[in-house]
Amino acid sequence: MPKRKQQGKKLEGEAKVDFDFGLGGFFKGLGDFLDLFSDMAETGESEVTRSGEFKVKGLGDKARGVYGFTVRTGIGGIPRVERFGNIRPSEKGPVVADVREPLVDIFDEGQQVLLVAELPGVSEEEIHVEAQDDVLSLQTTGRLKYEKEILLPGAVDPKPLEKTFKNGILELRLKRI
């Protein structure tokens, strides 16, 4: 996916599946995040992505869990964490949903807003986009389903100025109102 960064490098990787839902898992996860932030500061990286997937026994490809997160540091070094995937928390523990949440980047370019979304495995005809004021809804139909509501930096015209889709990457340019 094309990325625009002010400085630093991007590091991608896969995380192992290790679920511990007790208090020990919480502190281990918090410690892992702190280690990640420390490593980013030491190496000058501005973006780190971790992802993985697993299959639920007995359900075959119908229940494939995809999860991940991206940590970005901007001006001032304040980290921003964005999650993606189809695993959602519930009262009974994590649930693998039929709908995935795509990874989305938003760039405020003054009079325009550029939105870049990763939608692997879908065709352009399966993508439905609707903008209303400062909220953009993104959905896909077909075998793989993605869905996300995105808060934009301001109100936009509901019709994209420019829409491109290539190799699973959707780019939308929207005019600010």
Image (spheres, helix red, strand yellow):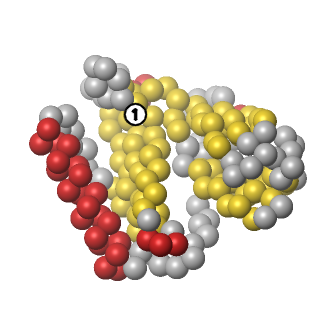
Q: Is residue 138 left or right of residue 11?
A: right
Is residue 22 visible to us here?
A: yes
Residue 146: image location, x then y, percent: 58, 35
Observer-nearest of 43 and 143: 43
- Residue type marked 1: Ile
Instruction: Give the residue pinned by disc 1.
Output: 87
Is residue 169 visible to us here?
A: no
Q: Is residue 55 left or right of residue 103?
A: left
Observer-nearest of 56 and 158: 158
Q: Is residue 151 left or right of residue 84?
A: right
Q: Residue at x 69, y 52 (%)?
A: 153
Residue 75: image location, x then y, percent: 52, 72
Image quadrant of residue 58?
top left
Q: Residue at x 59, y 50 (%)?
A: 104
Residue 124: image location, x then y, percent: 74, 42
Q: Residue at x 84, y 40 (%)?
A: 158
Farthest front residue?
Answer: 76
Q: Residues within 10 Å of mark 1 (few under 14, many from 20)?
A: many
The secondary element bearing badge 1 is classed as strand
